[in-house]
């Protein structure tokens, strides 16, 4: 990734030359041997244009841009849709030349339910949109019970960086503890938080497979209710 390596424009051109293989490398060598004066002033953008002109016809580029314009999530996951969106956007850079345009184009292709969730959040960045939708979709896949689904919605609705969703979750958990009553656990020694990694499914710190995905109680191991 040139941005990660912080390459200059001239360094991008040099790297680009060595990335060409086989017939493409032979063509490039002969092409610029006849254009040495122009090559000395070659920019990275111009190099990409020349390669695209050689290997992609104008009609092909227009077809791919049209495909990107019509791209929707369909039956795929958010992650699959984001991957295809990023790949196809290279054929229509003018449609995604700002983060806001990119986020709006991505949102327009989402399935209706997810699109409504995003629309209610205002102008999120592209990355924030993908992150929030991926999290929301993972909870929907687990078929989370209604009270937990409401907590997920509160987390999704919280502004970036807000801890309000976490406070609501902690409050809900404290209420559940109060309702149980009579369970004296003073003789038990809880696990240290740093002893095990935090589970991405239930939010607890525990070893082994998560029982939350099996829909059984953390306490008694029986189904149809939660610890």
Image (tube, rainbow, N blue to C red):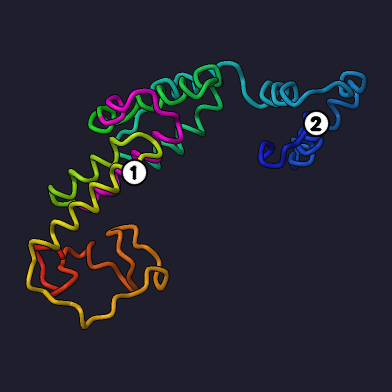
Magenta-span inclusion, residue 161? no
The reply, left or right, for residue 227 in relation to residue 82 is left
Q: In which quarter of the image is residue 91?
A: top right
Q: Residue at x 18, y 52 (%)?
A: 172
Q: Residues within 10 Å of mark 2 (few under 14, many from 20)?
A: some
Residue 144 image offset from top left, x and y in percent:
18, 51
Q: Residue at x 37, y 63 (%)?
A: 198
Q: Give the range drawn in magenta.
A: 117-143
Q: Name the residue under label 2.
A: 28
Residue 186 image offset from top left, x and y in percent:
20, 79
Quadrant in the picture for the C terminus = bottom left
Camera-side residue of 210 and 37 = 210
Q: Residues within 10 Å of mark 1 (few under 14, many from 20)?
A: few
Q: Which element carries disc 1, helix, strand or loop?
A: loop
Q: Are marks 2 and 1 in contact (CB under 8 Å)?
A: no
State whether residue 216 is above or below residue 201. Answer: below
Camera-side residue of 73 and 115 = 115
Residue 41 image offset from top left, x and y in percent:
86, 21
Q: Quadrant of residue 42?
A: top right
Residue 163: assigned label: 1
The reply, left or right, for residue 29 in relation to residue 53 is right
State whether residue 92 is above or below residue 166. Answer: above
The reply, left or right, for residue 99 in relation to residue 156 is right
Q: Which element carries disc 2, helix, strand or loop?
A: helix
Q: Sequence-wise, which precedes: disc 2 or disc 1?
A: 2
State whether residue 83 is above or below residue 54. Answer: below
Magenta-span inclusion, residue 122? yes
């Amino acid at each position: 990734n040139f941005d990660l390596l912080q390459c200059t424009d001239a360094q991008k051109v040099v790297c680009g030359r060595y990335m060409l293989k086989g017939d493409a490398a032979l063509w490039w060598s002969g092409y610029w041997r006849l254009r040495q004066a122009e090559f000395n002033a070659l920019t990275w953008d111009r190099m990409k244009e020349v390669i695209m002109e050689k290997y992609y016809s104008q009609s092909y580029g227009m077809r791919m841009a049209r495909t990107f314009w019509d791209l929707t999530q369909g039956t795929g996951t958010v992650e699959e849709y984001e991957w295809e969106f990023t790949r196809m956007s290279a054929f229509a850079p003018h449609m995604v030349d700002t983060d806001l345009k990119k986020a709006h184009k991505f949102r327009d292709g989402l399935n209706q339910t997810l699109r409504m969730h995003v629309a209610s959040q205002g102008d999120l960045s592209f990355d924030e949109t993908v992150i929030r939708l991926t999290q929301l979709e993972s909870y929907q896949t687990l078929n989370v019970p209604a009270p937990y689904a409401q907590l997920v919605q509160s987390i999704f609705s919280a502004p970036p960086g807000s801890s309000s969703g976490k406070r609501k979750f902690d409050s809900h958990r404290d209420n559940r503890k109060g309702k149980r009553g009579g369970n004296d656990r003073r003789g038990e020694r809880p696990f240290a938080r740093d002893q095990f990694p935090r589970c991405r499914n239930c939010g607890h710190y525990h070893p082994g497979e998560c029982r939350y995905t099996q829909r059984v109680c953390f306490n008694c191991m029986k189904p149809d209710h939660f610890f």
